[in-house]
Amino acid sequence: MSETPSDLKPGLPFSLVNKLDGLSKKMIPIDAERAMKMAERTTGLSDWGEGGLHQRLKETVDGLNHANLNTTGLFGARYVLNWHLGNKLRIIDFAKRHPELDDVAIEKPIVITGFFRTGTTFLHNVLAADPNNRVAKAWELSYPLGRLGDPLGDVAWRRAQAKFTFGFNQAAIPDQGVAHHVTADSYEECFFLLENEMAVLTFWIGFCAYDYANAMLDWDMVEPYESHKLQLKILNAQRSAKRWVVKCPWHIWNMDALMAVYPDAQLIFTHRDIAKALASHCSLAAKMGSKLRRSLDVNELGRFWLEYAKIGLDRAMEAREKIPESQLYDIRLRDMMASPMTVLEDLYSHFDLEWTPEIAGLLEQRISEKPTSQEGEHEYSIEDFGLTNEQVRETLKAYNERFGV
């Protein structure tokens, strides 16, 4: 196996921590039963409900145990499991005590998706400026409920937990911020809600657990998306608006499940030259995985992501054939950057959303702030991952031609 490139290796103090790698699998075991018991002790709850959670957890743990994690990665994986399993227990308990959630409607949510690094973050941040849009911050998505005494409130605890989580992530992966900087108060992706169902995107992107990623392609994702919807209802009880706006690139792999749960969703697909988008995403994945695995073969990473991108984009294009055109809107990144207000006004018109001078002014103000969630310059090249632009464009030719990128 190839060594991690020297410029990506962990720095202090994590490089010292990882000297325990030879002992860490025995010292920090990743085990489904242990993880569940830890979450029960942490929350004081024990009802896991019905459904496929146990099987998803088993496959998640299997994937982690095949991912060649270093000591930092094992600690991180244990933390993530306890975090999301604790959330799951709180969600089940709250839903049992509040059957009125069944009557809450999540109507015509706007769902922003598209391959990674295609402008979803920029658009999401801009749309958050419209007061009619309910856009969640990272602390809400990370901890949709507080502790038992005040589950809908407990904001200080929820924000503190999120700050610790993202602060540790920044300490372990300091170079991630040049590509995607996450804070407790940033507007973030809704994959956190799926992770509470043990459909954990973090493990196959951040931890480079490729076997796990491939196994998930065969999962029935309807149940995790039903939980996603339940959690939006819970968040809606804390602060509501006319409509929800959520975003996550992962939805392109799961479009059929998404539409089964949200049949009236208004979908925005963002598009970019796929060779550039893939290079940028591989760079981000490498910055994360290199800090959490004993070694990272960047050429293997490139091969995985080229194949996985094709699967996701092919799935999305096939699923789109069953979705009414009135519920679809495509945005090329270059068009959005060249004339964002023109694109936004057309988007609002397409979905018949309220467009006033006041709303236009708020959106324009947000655009002027350049909300990209990046710190510094993100430099990357597809050749760093054993690929070429021509190879990527040829492999994903159908996508590039269809959307003119």
Image (spheres, helix red, strand yellow):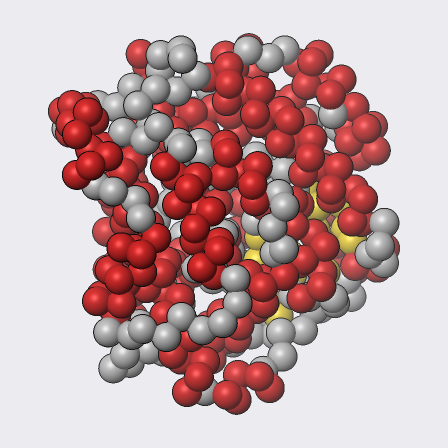
Hey, which quadrant is residue 67 in on the image?
top left
Residue 404 falls in image quadrant: top right
Q: In the image, what residue occupies the spot 35% across and 15% down?
A: 4
From the viewer's perspective, is 216 left or right of 350?
Answer: left
For image coordinates 65% across by 50% down, the residue present is 254
Whether residue 380 is situated above or below residue 126 in the rendered picture: above
Where 96 falls versus 295 (above or below)?
Answer: below
Which quadrant would the N terminus be assigned to in this image?
Answer: top left
335, above or below 93, in the image: above
**Residue 22 figure quarter:** top left
The spot of residue 212 in percent (x, y) is: 49, 39
Residue drawn at the location 32% of the way across and 64% of the way down: 86
Which residue is at the front of the view, 52 or 210? 52
Q: Position of residue 311 (x, y in %)?
A: 69, 35
| Residue 375 at x, y percent in the picture | 38, 33
Q: Nearer the viewer, residue 14 or 130?
A: 14
Q: Quadrant of the C terminus?
A: top right
Res. 245 in view: no
In the rendered structure, the answer to whether residue 159 lies left or right of residue 363 reads left
